[in-house]
Image: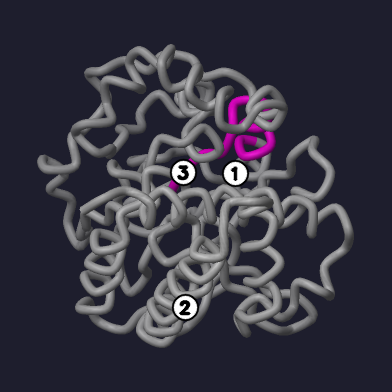
Amino acid sequence: MKEDDCTLIEIKQPIRGFDHFIGAWVYRGDIHLVVDVGPANSVNRLVEALANMNVERVDYVLITHIHIDHVGGLAKFLEYFPMAQVVCHDKAIRHLVDPSRLWEGSRKVLGDIADAYGPLKAVREEICIPHTQAHIKNLSVIETPGHAPHHLSFSYMGNLFAGEAGGNYLCVADRDYLRPATPPRFFLKDFLKTVDRLMALEDQHICYAHFGDARSSHQMLKRFRAQVLRWEKIVQKEVSAGSKDLIMRCVVRLLEKDPDLEVFEFMDPDTQDRERFFMANSVKGYIEFLETPG
């Protein structure tokens, strides 16, 4: 954690292996910000944590992207903080207003995990601010497609709320663990442009959605950019070797070859299962990208 004014709240999940994985960033100052709210079935835990921090008002909820582990609890959260306005990608607002397609797609990709997260409820359109119209003092809104086409990052008062644009970061056994989040459809050039766009900002405290923070955004983003390109080479080699057990082979090879994944071995078995699941989903994004002409 950086200081009392910028705090990561863990939102515990009723899923084995999902400890220290999902959270919301809270900034308290002249304005009170909450970045993402987590899934529907656990949003009460976020509300309780804010109450314990004596947070009685939230001015803005900043949505990095509309995957259900980030935005699923939004409607319920707004019942407790009706004064809050929601800053969201302008092309994603319609999915908050009518989340039926988003929920259907989430269940298709995540299966039982989606059911554990819980279904979304609709949000009123009039409280949503399109990101292109979010003129809030000291807040920079950065379009960061890659993990999702509607992904945003936010820079505020020396804090870069990067969502998943800089990958997933964990501290395990006092060592860094860094993993790309590149589900289908993944476009490598767009993702690299996003990382470059964030690196062009001033060096600042970087706040990850999953799950933690680091002092230097430049240092972590430079490291992440190299990892994204490393994964391309490793997955390309496996693709060239044939399709049999391709995803599993890629995951095994990445764990062998990527130094940013070394502390995987120190994770408990349930956390390893979670990471293998999301690693496989990221590998699918790479494979689709590599096998798509042009």
- Name which residue type carries label 1: Leu
SS class, disc 3: loop
Q: Earlier in the sequence, mark 2 or mark 1?
A: 1
Left or right of 217 on screen, residue 128: left
Q: Residues within 10 Å of mark 1 (few under 14, many from 20)?
A: some
Residue matched to label 2: 230
Q: Nearer the viewer, residue 105 or 57?
A: 105
SS class, disc 1: helix
Residue ID at (59%, 44%):
50
Q: Can the viewer see residue 32?
A: no
Could you say where residue 247 lies in the image, as x and y percent from the top left? 62, 53
User: Is residue 109 found inside the magenta-colored segment of the image?
Assistant: no
Residue ID at (85%, 53%):
270
Q: Earlier in the sequence, mark 1 or mark 3?
A: 3
**Figure disc tally:** 3
- Distance between the Cα atoms at labels 2 and 1? 40 Å
- Distance between the Cα atoms at labels 3 and 2? 29 Å
Could you say where residue 207 lies in the image, as x and y percent from the top left? 47, 66
- Name which residue type carries label 2: Arg
Left or right of 35 on screen, residue 129: left
The answer to whether marks 3 and 2 mark residues whose Cβ atoms lie closer than 8 Å is no
The answer to whether marks 2 and 1 mark residues whose Cβ atoms lie closer than 8 Å is no
Residue ID at (45%, 75%):
233
Is the magenta region chiefly helix, strand or loop? helix
SS class, disc 2: helix
Question: Magenta part of the protein: which range?
Answer: 35-47
Could you say where residue 125 lies in the image, as x and y percent from the top left? 25, 18
Residue matched to label 3: 36
User: Is residue 36 found inside the magenta-colored segment of the image?
Assistant: yes
Could you say where residue 196 lies in the image, as x and y percent from the top left? 24, 74
Residue matched to label 1: 50
Whether 152 is drawn above or below 180: the answer is above
